[in-house]
Image (spheres, grey):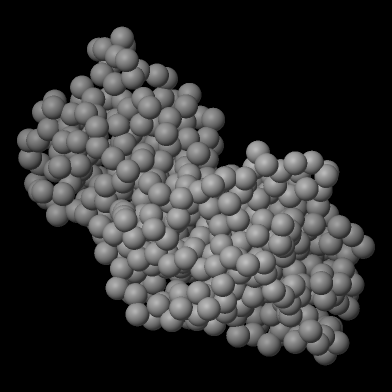
Amino acid sequence: MADTATYGYQSIARAVLDHEIDTMFGLMGDANLFMVDHYVRQGGGTFVPVAYEGSAVLMALAWSHVSGKVGVATVTHGPALTNCVTALTEGARGHIPMVLLAGDTSVMAPQNLQNIDQREVVKVTGAGFEQLRAPETAAHDVAHAIYRARVEKRPIVLNMPADFMWQEVTHRKTIFPAFAAPAMVPEGDDLDAAIGMIASARRPIILAGGGAAGARDRLIRLADRLEAPLATTLKAKGLFNGHPYNLDIVGTLSTPATYEAIAKSDCIVCFGASLHHFTTDKGKLMKGKRVVQVNESPLEAAKNFHPDVALIADAGLTADNIVHWLDEAEIPPSGFTRELDMEALTLHPPGRTGAKPGTVNYVQALRKLEEALPKERILTTDGGRFMTEVWCRISAPDPLSFIVTANFGSIGLGLQEAIGAALADRTRPVVLFTGDGGFMMGGVNEFNTAVRLGLDLIVIVANDSAYGAEHIQFIDRAMDPGLTEFDWPSFAEVATALGGEGITVGSDADLDRALAAIPNRTRPLLIELKLDPEDVPRMRI
């Protein structure tokens, strides 16, 4: 495009469009409203207005996860940015690339009521900060922020002073390619040590984390060569669906039988996993065995657990390399998979049966929902007490179709990310599991946004009328849990009032009616499961 005279706000909007980013999430204020207007009216972009600023960041994070592109959100200055702190932290800890175009108060008006040091606010979240240096550098600065988001794999906040917006500039299309060639195949003493550990193993396990989501076939080839079972961390849930020796999630979320099988193994080869203490059960599952960790980032290797050897390399290339050397040395397969009874290993405990009047049994409800929900779906989960059973009992097609909003241990982030996921892929329904506290904290804010956008969204609210994680702690110490209990409004009625369809489930007959409504939904559907707080399974942590 030829150089043309334009204003600062127009150059920022056009710079986003130059990167073929056609969706922007946000809430307008005096520092970004004209940029948003130009993005939509002149650029043809889609702007998704939110009710709360942090929601824009969360939607952009999920949009990025599902689409594979850099998500973009925008807010104005001061309190608008501070309302994004939890969401930015969630994205930084989840290593999700996105850019937040944050307005800032005028450079010439430091007395502005909403003026704060925005760089310092962003710094505490773990996100990156990029300053719009001058109106004439807008296209360059936007391009650099998007570049940083890609290569650093975290949110980048681009700070935009309000007084830059109406200054005349010349827009020049600027795009910086992000070099994403796979990391080199390792060699040397560390590789030799890793090959030796793997070759001598009699009960090896191949473990994949979210960083190995693109290496499915190569990891299966390695596992088949070793006759080793496959397993995943939570973030790679669904990666090995359909494989006969898929142990599913490793760690505190494993079935009891799988936990025992892992404990008996003598070598775990980990690809793209940081080995969080939920995965290792605080190191218990790694005792008495050799651990080989393959990760393309040196910051993730040994971050949570120190392996016997770490290879800083691409997961797929390294798996191929290991197979090559095993074949060269004519190492026989381990035969471990021949010892395994996969039906027993993958069977989660059935749980208790029955429920007190006015409630349903949570585990039994999950089993029925797993059968009734659309198979080709995007699964999104909020944080909180209810989610560990969902992670174990509700399937996801693959890791890119599964979003965990628990990187920061917060509740109330699920519905916003479900909306972002639904906008990134309108061909499939999005299923969200959330708790009552989480829905009140974030879901009520944005449920109507899903209605306005006409999204295919199914929300299951696990409602025990309490903050369950705290409730159980009072019960365990024989103390009164009354301060954790709430007389919430009917979430089903709230959903209906906000333009969706809500169904309350307080009995098995109610549950059957709710399940029958799933294939006939025409608008966002909310199913409220009424639960007994003293009869919900404990979190598997």
| Relative horizontal placement of residue 61, taking residue 258 as reference (left or right) | left
Of residue 434 and residue 101, the one placed in the foreground of this image is: 434
Residue depicted at 86% across the width and 72% down the height: 260
Q: Residue furthest bottom?
A: 338
Q: Residue furthest front?
A: 357
| Relative horizontal placement of residue 66, taking residue 189 as reference (left or right) | left
| Relative horizontal placement of residue 437, taking residue 144 as reference (left or right) | right
Q: Residue furthest top?
A: 111
Q: Residue furthest right?
A: 288
In percent of width and height, residue 280 lies at: 78, 58
Of residue 86 and residue 155, the one placed in the foreground of this image is: 86
Q: Quadrant of the C terminus?
A: bottom right
Of residue 231 and residue 292, the one placed in the foreground of this image is: 231
Q: Is residue 354 visible?
A: yes
The total of numbered circles placed on residues is: 0
| Relative horizontal placement of residue 57, taking residue 316 as reference (left or right) | left
Of residue 72 and residue 222, the one placed in the foreground of this image is: 72
Residue depicted at 36% across the width and 40% down the height: 52
Among the 4 quarters of the image, the one containing residue 262? bottom right
In percent of width and height, residue 370 lies at: 56, 78
Residue depicted at 67% across the width and 69% down the height: 355
Among the 4 quarters of the image, the one containing residue 53? top left
Among the 4 quarters of the image, the one containing residue 189? bottom right
Residue depicted at 40% across the width and 49% down the height: 444
In percent of width and height, residue 374 lies at: 45, 79
Q: Is residue 311 visible?
A: no
In percent of width and height, residue 475 lies at: 78, 48
